[in-house]
Amino acid sequence: MSFIEAEKSDFSYHNLPYGVFSTPDNSRHRIGVAIGDQILDLSVIKTLFRGPVLSKHQDVFEQPTLNSFMGLGYEAWREARRTLQVLLSANESTLRDDVSLRTRAFVHQNSATMHLPAEIGDYTDFYSSRDHATNVGTMFRGKENALMPNWLRLPVGYHGRASSVVVSGTPIRRPSGQMRPDQTKPPVFGPSKQLDIELEMAFFVGGGNRLGEPIPIGKAHEHIFGMVLMNDWSARDIQAWEYVPLGPFLGKNFGTTISPWVVPMEALLPFAEPNAIQEPEPLPYLRHDDAFTFNINLFVSVKGEGMAQAATICKSNFKYMYWTMKQQLAHHTVSGCNVRPGDLMASGTISGPDPESFGSMLELSWRGSKSIELGGGETRTFLKDGDEVTMTGYCEGAGYRVGFGSCMGTILPALQQ
């Protein structure tokens, strides 16, 4: 336990996620660790990292992003976590009893502005929920052809747009583009009428690899730094017209929101569950037996402009994923592709077997054929201007939580063309 009251918080002593923040009296972006309602400013206590790796690299905690720290690799992350657990424990006096140091080192979260935790060089989006892929395939191709022949053989993915990944709280502008609502007529241009959410999670790559040298699946966990919540906003009508043959483009590149706190994988390991049974058995480079699927409860709520309170529209869980993060990373690099610290890799929409666990409005409204009830007479098939979407998630331990905070964005009207 910690001397900071935190056990009822998403950010318990068992969590200790990393983020980047600034304050009204100091606009410099700093690396911090969340505990309870506080942020521990690592730039203030950098000299307390005295282990064999970090004693030589204390300057990484002076950087404006997590990239340099992530780039130090697996042993540095483990060492940092052990140091933080000691410094924040109830029995350790270094921070607890030094009033001057505590005053400088701790910032209340309410007084902080959060920023993107890393400079994201590249962003990859996978498509790894079998339930989601089956639902969407059924809508567009029929139940017999729901999954494409490659889907059970490899983690399908595509390269997204890193420049439009934004931190929670950033408004999202409704995109405009080409659509073809009437298949008997030419396409039209205008604001998307089918703006959607995608409930996802994503991991940050820590240590990278050299060009031409794949990351073997047995070592993949050493390159996965931690996880965030993600809303990969999607314009379904733009996407439907453009995606053949090369996949999503304007229907996805206008905005992707992530939560600001990166939960380290060590904090999630107690919540690992057996991986999905994969039939047919994957090729050898994708096989691993260790549990790397995680029991993370996930929720999505929508609050319209005229609504007094938000309505929960989805309750899902990360454990529903078919392909693991280790498989995603091993597949991504098996070609020799090099990944770098700060690269972001997303799960794809997370849907479960029951309708309430569907992770997109496309599924919840079944392609717009039925209404999603929000209460008070409010319904949706897709998002309206002014809608505020919030995603939350947490692991439930024995008397504590390991949570992710929130991933929130509000829809702004399209610009007039």
Image (cartoon, helix red, strand yellow):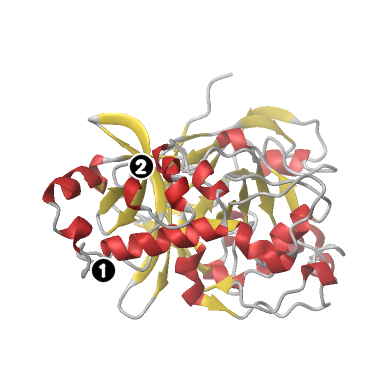
Three-letter amino acid code of the residue under disc 2? Glu
Residue 398 image position (x, y, % from top left):
34, 81
- Looking at the image, which residue is at 84% across and 62% down? 148
- Give the total of numbered labels: 2
Q: Nearer the viewer, residue 388 or 97?
A: 97
Q: Is residue 376 shown above or below 24?
A: below
Name the outermost residue toward the top: 417
- Looking at the image, which residue is at 63% across and 51% down? 345
Mark 1: give few (<14), some (14-19) or many (20+) Cα within 10 Å.
Answer: few
Q: Which of marks 2 and 1 precedes in the sequence? A: 1
Q: Nearer the viewer, residue 52 or 101?
A: 52
Three-letter amino acid code of the residue under disc 1? Lys
* Quarter of the image where the N terminus is located: bottom left
* Quarter of the image where the C terminus is located: top right
Mark 2: give few (<14), some (14-19) or many (20+) Cα within 10 Å.
Answer: few
Residue 68 lies left or right of residue 243; in this view the side is left
Residue 378 image position (x, y, % from top left):
40, 53
Q: Quadrant of residue 416?
A: top right
- Looking at the image, which residue is at 29% across and 50% down? 40
- Could you say which disc has been placed on residue 282 in the image? none
Q: How far separated are the C-alphas under marks 1 and 2?
A: 31 Å
Q: Is residue 384 shown above or below 284?
A: above
Instruction: Identify the residue under disc 1.
Output: 8
Instruction: Identify the residue under disc 2.
Output: 305
Residue 129 image position (x, y, % from top left):
66, 65
| SS assignment at label 2 | loop
Q: Is residue 55 shown above or below 161?
A: below
| SS assignment at label 1 | loop
